Image: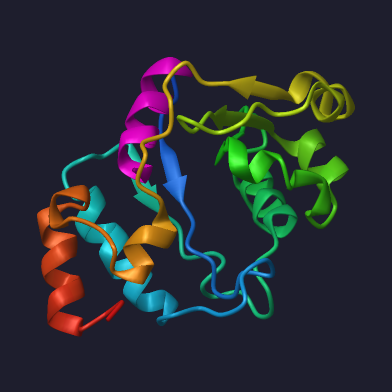
Amino acid sequence: GHLALARSALKELKLNYIYFVPARVSPLKRAQLHSPLHRVQMLRLALRGIPQLKVSQFEVHSPGPSYTIRTLEHFHRRHPRSQIFFLMGSDSLKKFERWKNWKKILELCALAVARRKGESAVSGKLLKRLGSRVQFLKSAAPLISSTEVRSGRFHPSKVPREVFRYIQAKRLYQ
């Protein structure tokens, strides 16, 4: 799902590249099921052969919870003249005002939002508060969610073959 969304965003937004940034410790999730290094390796396998899609280990090597604001400040320092987009699903946008320093996030990037099929619309009040820094992608987010993959309730065809083999070999998500 993330790969399909990234490929769509590359075309739609005319991006040079997209960084996938696995969190070391997500402040919004109860627990990490596996080492972030497994997630980095699975990303490397999934992105192999697609030079516009890259893996950043910034959050993996940063202490404490992985806050988006800190990551965006890092990318802004590295690419001060670039327009930065933060790609997210509409489910995440609905909770965006709970994020640490969400107003500052909007100063550093535009939010590129993919709607999920079958999901209720984002409220107009929220969109008004967030302002013009939100752009909805034409492509809908695929139906599979990362929660399904982590729970083991997914069909092997929903992830790249090399990633599925890695999951099996390392006995992840079982």
**Vertically, is 32 above or below 77?**
below
In the rendered structure, the answer to whether residue 154 lies left or right of residue 76 reads left
Q: Quadrant of residue 62?
A: bottom right
In the rendered structure, the answer to whether residue 129 lies left or right of residue 112 reads right
Q: Quadrant of the C terminus?
A: bottom left
Q: Dominant secondary structure of the magenta stretch?
A: helix
Q: Is residue 12 magenta?
A: yes
Q: Which residues are magenta?
A: 1-13
Nearer to the camera, 59 or 81: 59
**Vertically, is 151 above or below 161?**
below
Q: Quadrant of residue 82?
A: top right
Which residue lies at the image location 44% right of the left edge and 80% below the top edge? 33
Which residue lies at the image location 81% right of the left edge and 53% below the top edge? 98
Asked whether residue 87 is in view, the answer is no
Instruction: Give residue 12's position: percent from left, percent from top.
Output: 43, 16
Instruction: Give residue 75's position: percent from left, percent from top.
Output: 61, 48
Instruction: Give residue 94's position: percent from left, percent from top.
Output: 71, 41
**Vertically, is 124 above or below 163?**
above
Instruction: Give residue 156's position: percent from left, percent from top.
Output: 14, 57
